[in-house]
Image: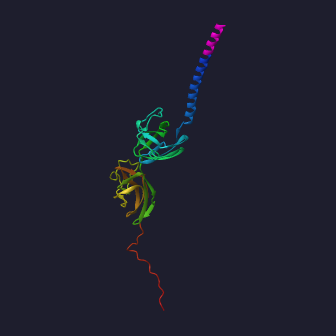
Amino acid sequence: MADEDKESGTELRGNKLIWLAGAVVLLIAGWFGLRAIFGSMESYKVTLIDAPNEVNAGTTATFTWRVDGPATTINQTAIRLGSVSQPGELGKDVKPENTQYSLFVQDFASGEFNIPLQFVGNIAMPNPGVFYYRVQALVKDKNYWSDEYTLEVKQPEYKVSIVDAPTQGTEGSVLTFTWDVSGVPTTINHTSVHFSTESTPGELAKNVAPDATSYEDLIQDFAKGTYNIPFRFIGNHTFDDAGTLYYRAHAIINNEHYWTEEKTIEISPAGRVSPTEVPEATDVPEEE
């Protein structure tokens, strides 16, 4: 009987140890489960909503992004850009200053912002090239990053175009020409419409100066000076000789020559009275 009691006591103690171990396991599992639940409740996310694929150098790029998660206040979110890619996933411990992204949209880089919220920010892109960027937000001392995207910044192309011009005129008449010089804002010192009685056919390259063409006459209004472009120019010119004239609008921008296609204008002889011709007399009634 004593042996049975001893054996029963041993079994009871063993069961207690098993239950105690099970309780510890349950407590640990519960702890990690609660952490997982509350951790998911504290999950934040940054999302790129809208962005350009390409822009011209010297212009502004506009980005739209969101920061989502449980309501809180943050002090920093931005688009972070750089000319060097930083591939892979960036962890919450990666600070912007420890990345390759040296540029950033400054609109919301400092302040107080209640999230969830959608943001719209701008940044001027001065230099051409390919830029890599991510959305970033600092939430409760953790950095949240989006995937990496690319933005191509292109070298802008300037253009000269004729807006309005006559197709015919007469000797001695003053004719008006209108042309545009468009592109990224800059300053030029010459633009004009150049004329000739001989054609200079084909497309003229940026290294072809007026002296290398047949155009020996031009509108003088903006041939010398300082002019801010983009701008629309209106100039006048008097044609002294009749015949077919060939012309192009032209501008010098950053030491390069920009030309329109070649056009023509017909100048007709002006009506003249011959000195040998005497107008016929008109009968005038005599006064009574």
Give the residue displayed 67% in from the left and 7% down from the top: 1
Residue at 61 percent across and 18 percent down: it is 16
User: Residue 223 at x, y = what percent?
Assistant: 35, 58
- How far across and down, in percent of the image, does residue 33 sit? 58, 29
**Rendering coords of residue 284 (x, y %):** 47, 85
Where is 268 relative to 161, above or below?
below
Q: Is residue 61 visible?
A: no
Residue sitting nearer the eye, 137 or 223: 137
- Percent across and percent down for residue 45 are 53, 38
By secondary structure, the bulk of the magenta-drawn segment is best described as helix
Point out the residue furthest to the bottom here.
288
Q: Is residue 225 magenta?
A: no
Choose between 205 and 1: the one closer to the eye: 1
Q: Is residue 9 magenta?
A: yes
* Residue 104 in sight: yes
Q: Is residue 49 left or right of residue 103?
A: right
Residue at image x 56%, y 28%? Answer: 31
Q: Which residues are magenta?
A: 1-14
Q: Is residue 178 left or right of residue 217?
A: right
